[in-house]
Amino acid sequence: MTDDVLVVHGGTPLQGRIRVRGAKNLVSKAMVAALLGDSPSRLFDVPKIRDVEVVRGLLGLHGVKVTDGDEDGELVFDPANVESASTDQINVHAGSSRIPILFCGPLLHRLGHAFIPDLGGCHIGPRPIDFHLQALREFGATVDKTPEGLHLSAPNGLHGTKFALPYPSVGATEQVLLTAVMAEGVTELRNAAVEPEIIDLICVLQKMGAIIKVHTDRVIEIQGVPKLHGYTHRPIPDRIEAASWAAAALATRGHVEVLGAEQADMMTFLNVFRSVGGEYEVTDTRPPRPGQPGQEGGIRFWHPGGELQATALETDVHPGFMTDWQQPLVVALTQARGLSIVHETVYEQRLGYTEALNSMGANIQVYRDCLGGTPCRFGRRNFKHSAVIAGPSKLHAADLVIPDLRAGFSHLIAALAAEGTSRVYGVDLINRGYEDFEAKLADLGAQVERP
């Protein structure tokens, strides 16, 4: 594990400019959607992260030719020769990502069968795939569970259905979209997730020839079509990464400009950021003019000096405060005066990272009670999912072991804000969702190094 550690010399405000590319939570799904086309697809602004490598490998195993385009971050997908992959080949990817479950619908359409290995992902709660499998059965798929994974088939084809999710799950909504677009008839999905990444996936599918209507009250209607073609798409920027760098700027009393960040999809975060005392400025993209270069827009985030103020927040599905924003922001809240309250309503085991912050001098208590009024998925199931943060706390260096992707970046922020030198172990996990983060840290003046 010695080669998977980052030495962080904390106490230096982050200063400078970095850029975010396409959203991790859209790019990988758009890559899977390319399986459905009968002609090549082209995706721009693809970040170089591990999840992209995993999906690229899985597509290659199934006969999709994936090549780099002319533009940096451009991928081209040719699905002309989609084929079955061996169980052993697919199992090489088992445990490395949760994306394989989304291959089910497209592979059933293209091949009539699919195999899905054991699923991985971050350990922040069980995140069962029951919603996925139930939806696929509703479409007419049969699912056989074996020790190595799931074997699916559709002996009578896939047909539209009416389906209501018990919770607006992002993954299950994506599953229904990717399956329904070529299922015979009309599919109606109720209580669907409507995150910006979901809407962007709908845009991708619509470009391919799908007919999808987004109604009010989380209802999505999909009219199946017999064939789809390729797409050309530039995804929305990664709002999770943008917020993570914003929280790092606040926690270290720094000033970070995040090029590519867009205001519209970050409104809820920006409101909280300002309410605790952070400042930001939205800069618009300026096209080139004669004699003048163009300039990419983004958002500048900074700590204006003085004290930060405690706040109360609850995570929720969109348009609420995103669960992936919670962990980075809590590090900044350790520096706010007063008692901040965080009610995590989406993932039951997402507050485990606070133990590491407490070891660095933070004062965070976690509770099983719902400290808020937002409906909670697990409030009566005895999970510690609410936190009270007393601040400000003086953070000091420590040795940290990263448990999952977002907690990992939070540990990194804490090490950057703390006095002294920390060692952050398991840091390569951050590469799952943050492109080239070590180079970006260097661009922002952080004092970090591999031992």
Image (cartoon, rainbow, N blue to C red):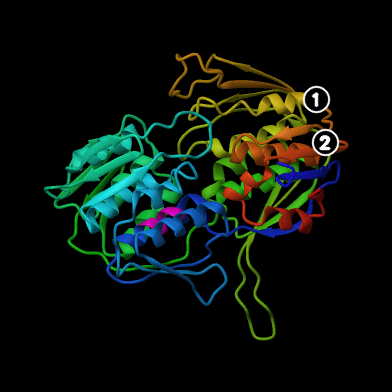
In this orientation, which residue lies closer to the viewer: 89 or 110? 89
Mark 2 / mark 1, whichever is N-terminal: 1
> Is 319 displayed left or right of 303 in the figure?
left
The answer to the question of whether label 2 and label 1 lie on touching residues, with beta carbons closer than 8 A, is yes
Residue pushed farthest front? Answer: 88
Q: Is label 1 in a helix, a strand or a loop?
A: loop
Can residue 303 be seen here? no
- Give the spatial CA distance, label 2 vs label 1: 9 Å
Density class for disc 1 (Cα within 10 Å; few <14, some 14-19, many ≥20) is some
In this orientation, which residue lies closer to the viewer: 282 or 114? 114
Amino acid on which disc 2 is placed = Ala
Vertical position of residue 234 compared to residue 334: above or below: below
Residue 182: horizontal and vertical position, in percent?
Answer: 21, 56
Q: Is label 2 in a helix, a strand or a loop?
A: loop
Which corner quadrant of the image does residue 298 belong to? bottom right
Q: Does the magenta segment cover residue 190?
A: no
In this orientation, which residue lies closer to the viewer: 71 or 301? 71
Vertical position of residue 40 compared to residue 12: above or below: below
Question: Where is mark 1, residue-wise?
Answer: 361
Residue 363: horizontal and vertical position, in percent?
Answer: 75, 21
What is the magenta range?
28-32
* Magenta region, main secondary structure: helix
Work out which quarter of the rendered image holds the N terminus and state it.
top right
Return the mark for residue 201.
none
Residue 10: horizontal and vertical position, in percent?
Answer: 84, 41
**Residue drawn at 82 percent across, 54 percent down:** 445
Vertical position of residue 310 compared to residue 366: above or below: below
Residue pushed farthest right? Answer: 420
Amino acid on which disc 1 is placed = Gly
> Is 286 displayed left or right of 331 in the figure?
left
Return the mark for residue 418.
2
